[in-house]
Image: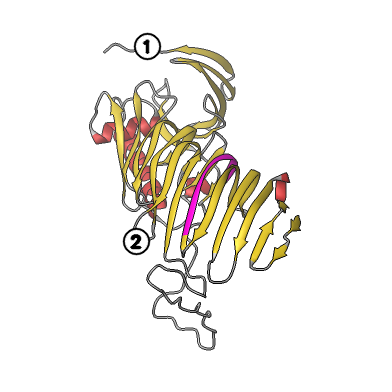
Amino acid sequence: GTLRVPLRDTQATIERFDFQGEGGGVLRLRGSVGFGSAQQARLQLVAEKFRALDRVDRRVAVSGSAAVGIQAGRLSVNGNFTVDEGLIDVTSLDAPTLDNDVLVIGRAEPARPPRAVSDGGKGSETGALARSDVDVRLDLGRALRLRGRGLDTRLGGKLHITSHAAGMLAVRGTVNTLDGTYTAYGQNLAIESGVISFTGDVANPRLDILAMRPDADIRVGVSVTGNPINPRVRLYSDPDLPELDKFTWLMTGRAPEGMGRDQAALLQRAAVALLAGERGNGDSFLKKFGIDELSVGNSPTGDTVVLIGKQLSKNLSVAYERGLSTTGGNVALLYRVAGWFTVRARTGSDNSVDVIWRWRWD
């Protein structure tokens, strides 16, 4: 970067401060700073695709400008920024920690910062700030991605960041999901609608997310409401069905009618395994092997068929199916063209190309 700051008496003028960060972004700062008894500063900050966060799991590049001022111990920030691109990855959020009853002998305690002495808001020689006034508007753009906790989606929306009397930041606005997926119960679901509403507390927004299975004949999926601290995950179907029927549709993609006891028992065991995996601290058993779908169904001959699938995109999936009483299996490639129109190519013990058109009567 380049820095040019002439000093005259108690006045410093920032004639040029241009800093180039990783990825080609630029941060510019202009203004003046006064020292001595009348401490004040008037600064203009401009960012052009500058990476405000630049970690492996947190990367956010922004563009915009803000006016920053310090007068009589009061900090003011007023600006507008837009997120050009970014990634927030929370897959490793739950890092291992020591229990409270574990004490490490000999580890140096972190140094505590010196206490600032307040002078009733009139300013002090130590430069302590008695109050901050923040008014920043943030446009998330369309290239900010959130990944982790089953979510993989782009985020859009606008937020208004302010400060209140207690000195804490408040966030208000709405964040929408864009073309995302949500993994639940071993299924890779498409987010049909997702709204995250901020009403002040940045750590406790309201969730309203609906993720649907893309290849089922009825609308079935998962609804997430509540807040990040205590989210409520429920099965969803339209028309409304009993919970067991919802789960069967979600797991197998078809109605529960015609399933025998052996298939129902196998489905229940699969459900228990999936739920246990989701309650654990790590990823589920299926996710570790890159599997998105595990379902149980019937073949035309009445044999029980187990299917393992992987969702490659919103409309394209690949699956391996095998009957419990047969010696061979099939690899199937399915492409959902539109609505209830699907093309399926199979190879293995049964080589075929099928064009499937499904309809239903209410």
Give the quarter of the figure containing the N terminus: bottom right
**Position of residue 65 in the picture relative to residue 324 (left or right):** right
Q: Which residues are magenta?
A: 75-87
Q: Find residue 346 and report its horizontal and vertical position in percent.
A: 57, 22
Q: Residue furthest front?
A: 9
Of the pair 30 and 97, the residue shown nearer to us? 30
Label 2 is placed on what type of residue? Ala
**Position of residue 208 in the picture relative to residue 21 (left or right):** left
Of the pair 107 and 234, the residue shown nearer to us? 107
Label 1 is placed on what type of residue? Trp
Q: Which residue is mark 1?
A: 359
CA gap, disc 2 and disc 1? 59 Å
Q: Which residue is mark 2?
A: 166
Q: Are marks 2 and 1 in contact (CB under 8 Å)?
A: no
Q: Find residue 54 and report its horizontal and vertical position in percent.
A: 63, 53
Q: Is residue 54 above or below residue 198?
A: below
User: Which-is-in-front pick, marks 2 and 1?
Assistant: 2
Give the quarter of the figure containing the C terminus: top left
Q: Residue furthest bottom?
A: 106
How many numbered tags mark residues here? 2
